[in-house]
Image (cartoon, rainbow, N blue to C red):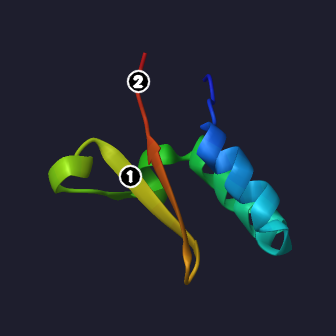
Amino acid sequence: MEVVFSDVFVKSLKKHSSIKDAIKKKVDMIIGKPIAIGEPLKGNFRGYYSCPVKKKFLIIYMYCKV
C-alpha cells in the first residue's frame, strides 16, 4: 500500500506537535484497516473517509484499492 500525505497535512502536523503522537497512532490504525476505522463522508466529500483525533482535529482521507 502506498501512503501519500498532502502538504497541508504535513504543515498541520508540525503546527499541532502537542498531539503528534495521537495523530501518528490514528494514521497507523488507518493504514491497517482503512475502511473499518473511518467514517464514510457524504455530499461533496463522497469517496473520502474521516477519522477524529481530538475534538478539533479530524483526518480526512481517501482509500483506493489498486
Determine the image quadrant of residue 32. top right
- The spot of residue 41 in percent (x, y) is 27, 56
Identify the residue at horizontal 81%, vertical 64% (top origin).
20
- The answer to whether residue 16 is above or below residue 29 is below
Identify the residue at horizontal 49%, vertical 45% (top origin).
34
Q: Residues within 10 Å of mark 1 (few under 14, many from 20)?
A: many
**Precedes in sequence: disc 1 or disc 2:** 1
Pointer 2: what residue? 65
- The answer to whether residue 37 is above or below residue 57 is above
Pick the quarter of the image with the C terminus: top left
Left or right placement of residue 45 versus residue 38 in this view: left
- The spot of residue 57 in percent (x, y) is 57, 72
Determine the image quadrant of residue 65. top left
Instruction: Indicate the secondary structure of the residue bearing disc 1.
Output: strand
- The spot of residue 7 in percent (x, y) is 64, 38
Instruction: Count every numbered label the image shows and give the total.
Output: 2
- The answer to whether residue 47 of the structure is visible from this angle is yes
The disc placed on residue 3 is none
Q: Residues within 10 Å of mark 2 (few under 14, many from 20)?
A: few
Left or right placement of residue 25 versus residue 27 in this view: right
Q: Which one is in front in this view, the residue at disc 1 or the one at disc 2?
A: 1
Pointer 1: what residue? 49
Which amino acid, mark 2?
A: Lys
- The spot of residue 64 in percent (x, y) is 41, 27
- Is 58 or 64 nearer to us in this picture? 58
